[in-house]
Image: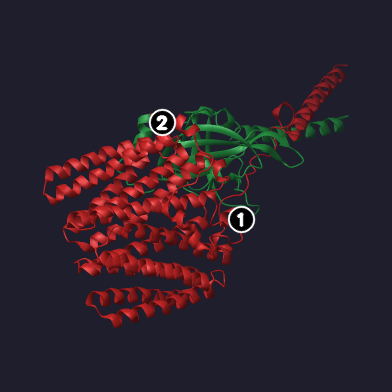
């Protein structure tokens, strides 16, 4: 497939479309990475790093939605259709992102190939449900063929930057992880399930980095010649991963709690591990005490949401109201903590507003799931997921602005001095060497002359 | 008269030393042809197909060989110098590898530089500009592990070019070689351009 024509039809804006963009107006008063920068390497938000974050969001969201869709598929859950629809919405958004860079034709080609691999996973789930071993083997074989096709398409589109042999290895890991997360779930080995789920989501952020690197390397002018590979961008990615994973695990845990599922404990444990990782990240910048303080405050809000779910399940109105009050108090406490820690870069008022939206979204997703109203459930989940990337950007911007010295690039900012001019004089020699040559010639001539003079004298 | 002769002889000896150092610098380019690796050997010694994506495949480079231009040189380790540029080899017969970046063979841009010339004449990377697409670059570790790279592109840039594109993260396993090229600006004490040879690991 000749991708060259597609590359020539790049639209002028490399704007990527994803749901979060629609609710931009709701975020007045929020700062998004507008901290003053001292150098490119310390920019949290520029065209290249924004591309990286956008792709991180789409790829990681894909993995998360794939995991829960497969679980709901084998469980015969009532909201399976809606989860699968959300997965398809993510595919559409990803394909539109590809199209915005490589053209409509490439976007369609990507969508077809990408959708095929989702289809083979569906086949695998259905074969598992029917205990059809041959069917499972067939699906795995088709996934293998998909790997080659997908790698080839991306290698060609990116002019060899996303090298097919490297991509094939990466896709193999992805397929194996998703299958492992699913198989372990059906075998009720839930420890393995959530360990693998966390890993597979985390790996998608490497995909985002790789693809954004290829695109910005291929079209540097469209991204102001900025790099995706900076310490500030890496911080933003780490925070994006931890904040968004928090959201996915929170939704999963609340649903499992509602259903009384056997893997509720492991889902909740994964959520706590995420809290530990997030607190460690805070501690790495602000010190151990701050990390502990953050962990206590953060954990409390998870606890209050659990209280809310329990109270709702048992019909305890009073306990439910108490949980809501506690969540409100949490909002103020969390906002104040972050404002103080970042020396006012993150404003408490903004944070309180953002946290209110977050809590409302979580309660909405829980309530609609509980009441069997599935239509708005996953669109809300997707929106809440996208919001976590804004949180990551804001917190990263504050941290980098506060401690720029921690985010200096160790890459050279100037070309090396690999020449001394020794071949820059006459005859490709240095001036010194040339002078030496002339001197030698003169002296040799002089010595010859002196020699003959002496000979003549002695022969006289 | 004899004193005059003696003075002449002494001068001859002195200029002879100068010529000798010229010979020393030109002997930085080896005249003996280094071992040429066959493609089969190269693919066997690069990482095996069964290797996971996350497994690094780089080596700490000790020696570099570029058969097409008769280069065989030792590799020093370097880091950022005070002025923010990549450090250069202390011995101008050697090349230098940027140790804060990826190892040759790992994913990303491993970078090495070498002088095009020293004060007296050509240096280790004098003939780098002759390299063409497909030429091989072989890097060996002190324990004898080899990685073979293939030239993808040779391009020169003005010396003010920001080098971050040649360093750091990449999805492919690259080794970029940098040296000076173009006119030597005597006032500035450096060449006006930089030559970058982009190479990629040859894998099975």
Estimate the x, y position of residue A331 in percent, counting from the top left.
Answer: 44, 75
Estimate the x, y position of residue B36 in percent, counting from the top left.
Answer: 43, 29
A189 or B72: nearer the eye?
A189
Estimate the x, y position of residue B72 in percent, counting from the top left.
Answer: 52, 35
Chain containing the residue with disc 1: A
Residue depicted at 44% across the width and 39% down the height: A161
Which colour is chain B painted? green
Q: Quadrant of the N terminus of chain B?
A: top right
Residue B105 visible in this rendered orientation of the protein: no
Helix, strand or loop at label 1? It is loop
Observer-side mark, 1 or 2, equals 1
Residue depicted at 61% across the width and 34% down the height: B156
Q: Residue tagged by mark 1?
A: A39
Residue depicted at 24% across the width and 78% down the height: A315
Q: Mark 1 and mark 2: span between their CA atoms?
A: 44 Å
Helix, strand or loop at label 2? It is loop
């Amino acid at each position: 497939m000749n991708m060259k024509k597609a590359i020539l039809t790049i639209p002028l804006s490399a704007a990527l479309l994803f749901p979060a963009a629609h609710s931009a107006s709701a975020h007045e008063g929020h700062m998004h990475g507008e901290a003053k920068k001292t150098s490119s390497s310390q920019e949290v938000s520029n065209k290249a790093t924004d591309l990286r974050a956008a792709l991180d969001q789409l790829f990681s969201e894909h993995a998360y939605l794939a995991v829960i869709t497969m679980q709901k598929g084998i469980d015969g859950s009532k909201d399976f259709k809606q989860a699968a629809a959300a997965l398809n919405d993510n595919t559409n958004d990803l394909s539109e992102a590809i199209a915005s860079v490589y053209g409509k034709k490439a976007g369609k080609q990507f969508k077809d190939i990408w959708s095929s691999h989702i289809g083979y996973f569906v086949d695998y789930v259905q074969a598992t449900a029917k205990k059809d071993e041959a069917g499972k083997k067939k699906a795995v074989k088709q996934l293998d063929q998909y790997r080659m096709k997908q790698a080839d398409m991306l290698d060609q589109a990116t002019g060899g930057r996303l090298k097919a042999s490297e991509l094939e290895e990466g896709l193999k890991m992805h397929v194996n992880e998703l299958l492992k997360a699913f198989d372990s779930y059906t075998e009720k080995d839930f420890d393995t399930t959530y360990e693998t789920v966390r890993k597979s989501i985390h790996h998608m952020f490497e995909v985002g980095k790789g693809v954004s690197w290829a695109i910005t390397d291929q079209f540097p002018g469209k991204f102001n010649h900025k790099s995706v590979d900076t310490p500030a961008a890496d911080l933003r990615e780490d925070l994006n991963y931890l904040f968004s994973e928090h959201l996915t695990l929170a939704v999963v845990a609340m649903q499992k709690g509602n259903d009384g599922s056997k893997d509720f404990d492991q889902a909740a444990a994964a959520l706590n591990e995420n809290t530990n990782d997030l607190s460690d990240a805070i501690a790495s910048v602000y010190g151990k005490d701050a990390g502990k303080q953050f962990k206590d405050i953060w954990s409390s809000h998870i606890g209050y949401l659990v209280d809310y779910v329990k109270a709702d399940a048992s019909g305890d109105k009073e306990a439910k109201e108490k949980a809501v009050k506690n969540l409100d108090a949490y909002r103020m406490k969390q906002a104040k903590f972050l404002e103080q820690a970042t020396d006012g870069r993150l404003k408490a008022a903004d944070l309180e507003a953002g946290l209110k939206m977050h809590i409302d979204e979580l309660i909405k997703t829980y309530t609609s799931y509980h009441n069997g109203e599935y239509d708005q459930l996953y669109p809300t989940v997707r929106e809440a997921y996208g919001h976590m990337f804004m949180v990551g950007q804001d917190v990263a911007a504050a941290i980098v602005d506060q401690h720029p010295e921690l985010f200096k690039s160790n890459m050279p900012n100037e070309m090396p001095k690999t020449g001394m001019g020794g071949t820059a004089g006459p005859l490709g020699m240095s001036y010194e060497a040339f002078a030496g040559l002339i001197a030698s010639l003169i002296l040799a001539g002089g010595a010859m002359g002196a020699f003959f003079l002496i000979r003549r004298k002695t022969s006289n | 008269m004899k004193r005059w002769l003696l003075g002449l002889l002494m001068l001859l000896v002195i200029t002879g030393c100068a010529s000798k150092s010229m010979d020393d610098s030109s002997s930085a380019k080896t005249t003996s042809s280094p071992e040429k690796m066959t493609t089969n050997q190269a693919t066997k010694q690069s990482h095996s197909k069964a290797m996971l994506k996350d497994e690094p495949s780089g080596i700490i480079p000790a020696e570099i060989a570029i058969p097409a231009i008769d280069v065989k040189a030792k590799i020093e380790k370097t880091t950022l110098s005070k002025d923010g540029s990549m450090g250069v080899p202390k011995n101008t017969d050697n090349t230098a590898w940027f140790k804060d970046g990826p190892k040759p063979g790992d994913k990303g841009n491993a970078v090495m530089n070498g002088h095009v010339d020293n004060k007296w004449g050509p240096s280790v990377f004098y003939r780098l500009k002759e390299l063409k697409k497909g030429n091989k670059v072989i890097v060996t570790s002190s324990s004898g592990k080899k990685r073979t790279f293939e030239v993808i592109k040779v391009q020169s840039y003005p010396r003010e070019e920001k080098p971050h594109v040649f360093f750091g993260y990449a999805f492919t396993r690259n080794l970029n070689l940098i040296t000076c090229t173009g006119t030597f600006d005597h006032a500035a004490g450096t060449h006006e351009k930089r030559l970058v040879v982009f190479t990629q690991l040859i894998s099975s």
